[in-house]
Structures are given as structure tokens and as C-alpha cells.
Amino acid sequence: MRVLISPSYGNAETRRHWADTIAQHVSFTDKRYDEVLSPEQRVQLTELHPEGAARFWGATSSHDKRMRGVSTGDVVLFTGENRVRAVGEVGAIFRNQELADRLWPPSKDGKSWHTVYTLLDLADVAFSYTDLNLAIGYKPAHNFPGQMVLTDEKARSVLEEFMITPGAAWTRQPLEPPAPARHGERAPQAVRSAALEEMRTRRTAYQRSRRLIVVDRHESSLVGEFRRYLAAAGRRATRFYCPGGISDLYISDGSGAELIEAKSNPGHRYVRQALGQLLDYAPHSPQGTDRLSALFPERPADGDVALLHRYGVDCLYRVGPGVFGKTSASDERRNQMREIWSGSAAS
């Protein structure tokens, strides 16, 4: 998996390019673009963008070596004005300087762009350079002056820190067959773990069924902090995909299996959202679920904690930097509700 970091708003020319080919879709079937496409490029564009239009971006020839391994489903962070301003997912990608010059006519002394790529999805965000540098392991003052391509652990760290899930992660391969249902239980639907190496796909087999997910920054920060809290206690959290979506945190170890849904706000609306998602995802947990927990940046109101406890759900909340508290549902209620969590209760 690769993560591109692409400066996109640093000068007037780049901002104009953004307005022309990112802020709006470009019809690649127009003659002035279509006539300079190779047959292979035309097929690639049409397969990924059957509507005949897409958002485009690119890179100059000086970045050819860096861009060589970039593929459909990779993630690009568009930077400018001291922040990451958007996250995109790479679609078609190829080299075509003539197309690039028609999309982005070079200035008198400027360089032509060489690599051209489309975006399957684009999400507006506001991540600070400080947070991005922390995720990569760079000094806080680094300002990302040029194109970068991150791989391996650096790419993994960025995706995990900002909880970015490309649509390619949903379509890389079929969901794993579910375990057989026990007597009297409803057969579970297929699930699979959210492994980074699954977030790639061959262009020729790409089918669009899910969209790019970028979690609210406050929520992803909370999840990251709680993940580190768990790691300090020797526990490792993962995520899993299921028909209803993707979990925030899932722990399965000697202490049992726990599904955790995080929210960026402890208000009533967010408590209800967390409860609904937990009940939706729980029947699909890979190794079953012993506990359900909702995670918040601070303790919700007593009535909302009681709402969670009514369904056997524990309430986790931040009490200080790297420190979390828990208000647990009663064992009796949790045991009563576990059959409902599993989806095996009679409808």
C-alpha cells in the first residue's frame, strides 16, 4: 500500500490546476483529450469511470521513479496552507505528457506534468502538518515542500492514525466464509479482517462497491490514543469489515473478545449512533463478542450511560492524556443481551 503526499495549493498556478481538474470533473471523452489517449489508457479510464468524467491530478517527470509503483486504490493526501486539505483514492494512472499539457498547460518557464492519475473519491479534511509529521515520524516543523510516496510502515501509520479506508479495501478479495452457525442460531454473514495489504487491487479486476472512508479527525485521534493505551497494557486492537461497515476497534485475546465503537462527542445523538453501530456489527465479529463498549472523549450524561447499560454495553471515556475510565454494564444484563448481540435471538 502506498500513500502519496502531493502539494496542491502552494502557488497561483497550482491553485488554478486544482480549480480546473480537482474542484470539478473533466470529461475525458471530449475530443481534445480522447485523441491523445492510447487504447489501453482509454480502457482503463472507462472501466474506472464509466460516466466518462473524472477528477485528475499528476506529477512531473522528475517524480517518475517515485510514482512507478503507485496503483489503483492507493491513497493521496493533498497538502497546502500548512495542512492536509483533502484525501483522495487513486483511480487510473499512466504516463501521458500530451494529455497532461492539455489538462494543465505549463507556464512559460514551468515544467510539463508527466504522470496523470484520476481520483475515485475525494474527501475534504483538515489534518495539521503537526499530526501528519507525528504519524510519519518526522520533525514537527517539516512542511512537505515536494511530492512524496510513503510505503510500508510509514504508509500504514498514516492510514491508521487518520483512520483512512480506501474503497479498494472493500473489493480486494471476497469476504471469508463465516463459521458454521451453532444449533438454533442464525448463520452469520461473511467478514474479514482489515489488513493493510488488502488495500490494493488490480485495475483489471476493480469493481466499485464501497467508497473512501475518512473518519472525523477528533474521532480518529481518540481511537489512536486508546489504541496506544491498550498497547501499553499488552493488548492489540484490529478492525474488521462486515456487510454493515467497518469496526473501529476489535480485541480478541486472553481477556476475551471486545468490540469498541468510538464517537467524537459524548452527546445523546452520538451515544445512540455508537449503540446502533455496535448492535449492527456485533453479529459479524470474527471470533464472537464477549463485550460491547462505546468510547467517548469524556463521560456521557448519566442517562446516556444508562441507555448503553440497558443493552449490556460498557461505557469507555477519556479522563486525561492517555488515561481512560470505564463504567461497566452489569454482568447480568450483559449475559442477557449477549444472545441478541450474536443475532441468534428469535425475531
Image: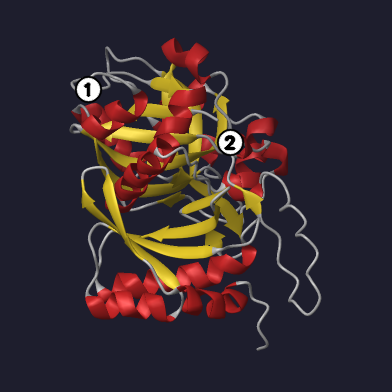
How far apart, in angstroms, are the residues tagged by discs 1 and 2? 27 Å
Q: Position of residue 332 (x, y in %)?
A: 49, 78
Image height of 104 relative to 343, above or below: above
- Crowding around mark 1 (Cα neighbors within 10 Å: few <14, some 14 to 19, many 20+) is some
Q: Is residue 243 visible?
A: yes
Q: Is residue 8 visible?
A: no
Quadrant hosting residue 276: bottom left
Quadrant hosting residue 245: bottom right
Q: Of all residues shown, which one is farthest toward the bottom?
A: 347
Q: Amino acid at mark 2?
A: Thr
Q: Position of residue 159 (x, y in %)?
A: 44, 38
Which residue matches tag 1?
143
Which residue matches tag 2?
72
Image height of 233 relative to 274, above or below: above
Q: Position of residue 199 (x, y in %)?
A: 58, 39
Q: Is residue 334 left or right of residue 315?
A: right
* Label 2 element class: loop
Q: Amino acid at mark 1?
A: Asn
The C terminus: image quadrant: bottom right
Depth order, front residue of 337/49: 337
Depth order, front residue of 189/337: 337
Quadrant hosting residue 182: bottom right
The N terminus: image quadrant: top right
Residue at the image position 43 percent from the left and 25 percent from the top: 154
Whether pointer 1 and pointer 2 mark residues with C-beta atoms closer than 8 Å, the reply is no
Image height of 113 relative to 192, above or below: above
Image height of 208 relative to 201, above or below: below
Q: Position of residue 292 (x, y in %)?
A: 48, 65
